[in-house]
């Protein structure tokens, strides 16, 4: 049954009320790191209290750990449209991308295709493949106003007759663009390439069905749109690719059998071979609740709401003379990431100034010469207005050099 508009609005108001930071600041930065709700924090507190009071590996606490990890894998599989035996728990997106990219036996001269709108988490593994394996790296130049047709055409050219790998974000951190992944994957597979997707900006944002997508490997984080704790992520590897994508770091989880006389049999087709060792159970408990919360909102409803907020932001910022929208506004490419440039103002100064002057938490993307607002379901139109009012003021009065603070001067703008 689909929710009525009133029910949906009530849900967004509820999650805003349940997200403490939203009572204090205008937080529009989940593309960097999403704010934790009370329920996520409580789940982490409960698990930590259990460890503190009963001891970390006392039997009941161990049982709770196993149950939490199992639940995380199951929910991860449900969210990603995958089977549980295709999901490994990682530390973050970048780790997942690295596992998949470095696990393929690339040969000198093998073509690796990526784009000009990748985050360092995808771009550096691509350069590393060139550096260490001698891959022939092709970088598809993509502009924020390219539509699906133009993007497909550019990929078609870059892939050539044969390609070994594609490393690409499904939603770009620097243009906010949704890429036509299904077509790119089809073209890449027709050339024999393995497709590794950086899903840092998709999980908890875009409804995902990885079996339908047909991708080889897909990495996501807990801490961005899902609003889980940081320090965890998930890696999906399609069942039939697990055996030939080798793990880059190994532990007992790789071993079917081993002894001290030289006997060792690896479990090549078990996805758990990608997990190395002990992980934080309080973080896993928080991520479980973050995924439950997201699935409870409804992935399609979240996607629709995020894009409605971006539409609203486009209209609001279009009315500010001197502002140029730098995110993608096509119906097929628009997401909850909204980027803009303000004439005469350096984005890397404007974003921290917005914190100093109005307690708006956002980030700049230097590569795009833009400030980025991440618009998630706990945000509302008033958040967009607040950011827009500040930009109007900055354009009128100018800005003073930023002080320290969230997103302040000299802070890394990585996320
Ligand atoms: C597209 C993209 N890829 C990778 C990352 C890095 O993510 P993680 O911290 O999960 O490795 C980010 C953001 O930080 C991103 O936006």
Image: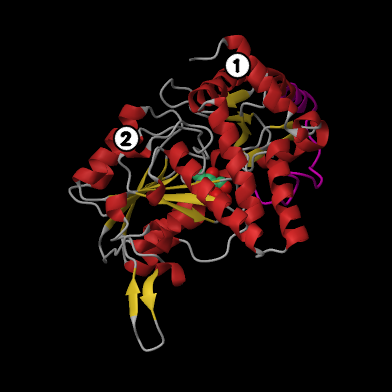
The numbered mark, 2 or 1, whose residue comes first in the sequence reads 1
Say what secondary structure mark 1 lies in: helix
Q: Is residue 172 visible?
A: yes
User: Which residue extends farthest front?
Assistant: 59
Q: x and y percent of residue 404 in the render?
A: 80, 47
Q: x and y percent of residue 37 in the render?
A: 70, 36
Compared to 303, does 192 lie above or below?
Answer: below
Q: How many marks?
A: 2
* Residue pictured at 74% horizontal, 40% vertical: 352
In contact (CB < 8 Å): disc 2 and disc 1: no
* The stretch drawn in magenta includes residue 173: no
Q: CA separation, marks 2 and 1?
A: 27 Å
Q: x and y percent of residue 151 in the render?
A: 34, 34
Report the disc number at residue 212.
2
User: Circle 1 sits on which residue?
Assistant: 8
Q: Report the front residue among 78 and 238.
A: 78
Q: x and y percent of residue 59 in the render?
A: 63, 62
Compared to 189, does 251 lie above or below?
Answer: below
Q: Report the front residue among 100 and 70.
A: 70
* Residue pictured at 51% horizontal, 21% vertical: 304
* The stretch drawn in magenta includes residue 412: yes
Provide the residue span drawn in magenta.
389-413
The coloring applied to the image is secondary structure
């Amino acid at each position: 049954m689909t929710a009525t508009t009133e029910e949906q609005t009530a849900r967004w108001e509820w999650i805003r009320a349940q997200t403490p930071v939203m009572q204090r600041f205008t937080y529009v930065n989940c593309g960097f790191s999403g704010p934790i709700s009370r329920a996520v924090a409580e789940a982490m507190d409960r698990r930590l209290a259990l460890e503190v009071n009963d001891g970390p590996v006392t039997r009941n606490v161990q049982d709770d750990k196993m149950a939490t990890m199992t639940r995380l894998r199951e929910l991860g599989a449900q969210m990603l449209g995958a089977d549980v035996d295709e999901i490994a728990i990682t530390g973050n997106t970048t780790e997942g991308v690295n596992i998949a990219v470095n696990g393929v036996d690339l040969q000198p001269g093998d073509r690796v295709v990526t784009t000009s709108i990748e985050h360092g988490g995808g771009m550096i593994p691509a350069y590393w493949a060139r550096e260490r394996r001698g891959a022939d790296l092709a970088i598809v130049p993509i502009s924020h106003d390219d539509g699906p047709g133009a993007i497909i055409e550019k990929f078609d050219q870059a892939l050539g007759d044969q390609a070994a790998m594609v490393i690409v974000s499904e939603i770009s951190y620097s243009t906010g663009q949704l890429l036509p992944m299904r077509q790119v994957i089809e073209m890449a597979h027709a050339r024999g390439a393995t497709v590794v997707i950086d899903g840092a900006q998709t999980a908890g944002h875009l409804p995902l069905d990885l079996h339908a997508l047909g991708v080889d490997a897909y990495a996501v984080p807990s801490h961005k749109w899902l609003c889980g704790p940081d320090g965890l992520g998930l890696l999906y590897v399609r069942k039939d690719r697990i055996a030939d994508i080798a793990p880059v770091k190994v532990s007992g989880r790789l071993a079917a059998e081993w002894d001290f006389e030289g006997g060792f049999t690896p479990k090549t087709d078990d996805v758990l071979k990608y997990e190395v060792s002990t992980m934080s159970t309080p973080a896993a408990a928080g991520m479980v609740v973050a995924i439950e919360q997201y699935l409870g909102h409804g992935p399609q409803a979240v996607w629709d709401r995020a894009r409605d907020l971006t539409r609203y932001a486009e209209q609001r910022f279009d009315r500010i003379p001197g502002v140029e929208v730098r995110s993608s506004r096509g119906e097929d490419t628009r997401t909850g990431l909204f980027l803009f440039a303000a004439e005469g103002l350096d984005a890397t100064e404007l974003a921290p100034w917005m914190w100093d002057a109005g307690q708006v938490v956002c980030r700049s993307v230097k590569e795009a010469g833009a400030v980025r607002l991440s618009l998630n379901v706990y945000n509302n139109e008033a958040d967009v207005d607040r950011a827009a009012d500040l930009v109007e003021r900055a354009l009128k009065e100018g800005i003073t050099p930023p002080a320290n603070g969230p997103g302040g001067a000299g802070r890394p703008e990585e996320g």
